Image (cartoon, rainbow, N blue to C red):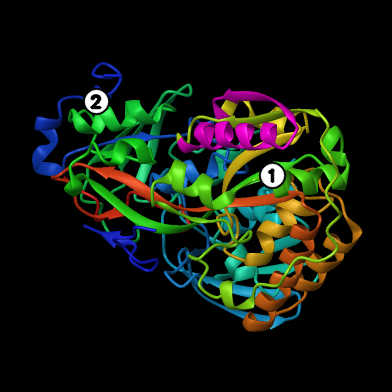
Amino acid sequence: MRRRHLLGSLLLAPVLTACFASTGGDSADRGSDGARLRVALAFPPTENLSPYGADATLLSRLGVTEGLTALDANGAAAPALAESWRREDDRSWLFTLREATFQDGSQVTPAAVAAALTHAGDAKPAPAALSGVTLAAKAAGDAVRITTKAADPVLPLRLSSPNLAVFAAKAYTGGTVDPVGTATGPFELTELTGSTAAALDRFDDYWGGRAQASGIDARFVADGTARANALRTGQVDIAEAIPVSQAATLDAAGIEETATTRTTSLQLNTESGPFKDPGLRAAAREAIDVPALVKGVFEGYADPGAGIYGPAVAWAEGKRLRPTGRAAAARPNGTAVTLATYDNRPELPEVAQVLQQQLQKAGFKVNLVVREYARLESDALAGKFDAFVVARNSLVDTGDPVGVLAGDYTCDGGYNLARLCDEKVDKAVTEADQVADTARRQDAAMRAEAAILGTDAVVPLAHQGIIVGVGTDVRGVLLDPYERTLVGTGTRR
């Protein structure tokens, strides 16, 4: 795979003219105070920018939100709103806060943080970062004491999740969480225009220092070619998720790439429909030529799928175990299945088309459905498709390798696209979640991965890199393998 930037290198130096016009006045008038950044994002908000679902990463990528901790380049918990922390006993942790201010002018106090975490814990459905976890937070002097119902050895990692961002008290007064002007990051959300645009201004009292850009004009553009064209014609400064097919059309100086912990996989519905039969799931797996798919679709910007965790999770390869307990493949005999994916990530429809051909060659009849993600997610989570192609960052929710397994493949998982509910899998994930030592936890995670792969509920296809289009005068874009950050205090033009 072509990678001009290693995993740890996080800090790097149709025409849509009307769509990308600035929302806040003439940029030349603001030049002396740092020009505004024009950013094209691939995924529109689906939940009015609620921090408890998929929209949470939109807020963190735009520099709006923060949690008590963050992830460093090695995937360890690092200070954010909490300066330090210590474990008091198996179930209790004490997080000491730094001096910080909410964007509404109120202070980040232990009581405010405890209230924010309580709201997250009470949210329905539960945020992915709290899958299987019950916590209680209380102010304790200049710190917050967080107690979990069961021992949680990775709580500092869990609290780095964008789902657990901290907001001021007034964010919670309307029955939903209102992120406008209530977060703590270097940029303050001032306006959300449906699912098409957002305006942000610099938050001058940010504890981490004043951002160099005066604000951000963000647009949500699902079409990858349109994002690339907008960058090429100078309508945007930063365009995320540039399609592989478009990368070659951009100046080499205008793209940045890094390995990510994102895996594209085929999720097979184990609860209903044809793939409830493990033999047909095995037949689908055997029908897929993964190396040919990766070579034909990703053009060198991905590695063949080896498991749920890919090469960017450096420790995984040496610990990977062979799946056991797989069923023998059955004959498809013309079995009809519906395969779905979304076009926000432009490679996915092409992946789905290749899978359609390979499965049909093996004897399946395949109906292909492609929509924008916002119009597809609820149906996918409800199990309305037989198979679903998804690109999923395995460490985005918690930074913990066990977290994605609990959220995606257990009976109570909140993002269980495969609708998997398997006693052996749940036991393996539960056992992994009880291990505190890092190396032993990784070993346990790989045993759980092997149990999941043994069900053929998921077929790993590709481990992707990320391609971001960057204007030639832009500096300081954050390329994050966990895909939580994009714009920070040093991002400027």
Which residue, given by chain and number where applicable, does mark 2 sit on? 22
For the residue labelled by badge 1, is the local secondary structure a helix, a strand or a loop?
helix
Residue density around tag 1, few if under 14, some if 14–19, many if 20 or more, within 10 Å = some
- Residue 380 image-quadrant placement: top right
Amino acid of disc 2: Ser
Query: In this rendering, is residue 28 above or below 251?
Result: above
Which residue, given by chain and number where applicable, does mark 1 sit on? 287
At x 71% / y 36%, what residue is drawn? 387
Foreground: disc 2 or disc 1? 1
Q: Does residue 223 appear left or right of residue 407 in this picture?
A: left
Residue 417, how many percent across, how many down?
A: 72, 42
Query: In this rendering, is residue 407 above or below 348?
Result: below
Q: Which range of residues does the magenta coloring cover?
A: 347-373
In contact (CB < 8 Å): disc 2 and disc 1: no
Query: In this rendering, is residue 269 above or below 223?
Result: below
In terms of depth relative to the viewer, which is nearer, 399 or 49? Answer: 399
In terms of depth relative to the viewer, which is nearer, 200 or 125? Answer: 125
Residue 310, how many percent across, how many down?
A: 54, 62
Amino acid of disc 1: Ala
In terms of depth relative to the viewer, which is nearer, 61 or 203? Answer: 61
Alpha carbons under labels 2 and 1: distance apart: 49 Å
Asked whether residue 363 is drawn in magenta, I would say yes
Among the two numbered marks 2 and 1 on one chain, the one whose residue lies closer to the N terminus: 2
At x 73% / y 75%, what residue is drawn? 444
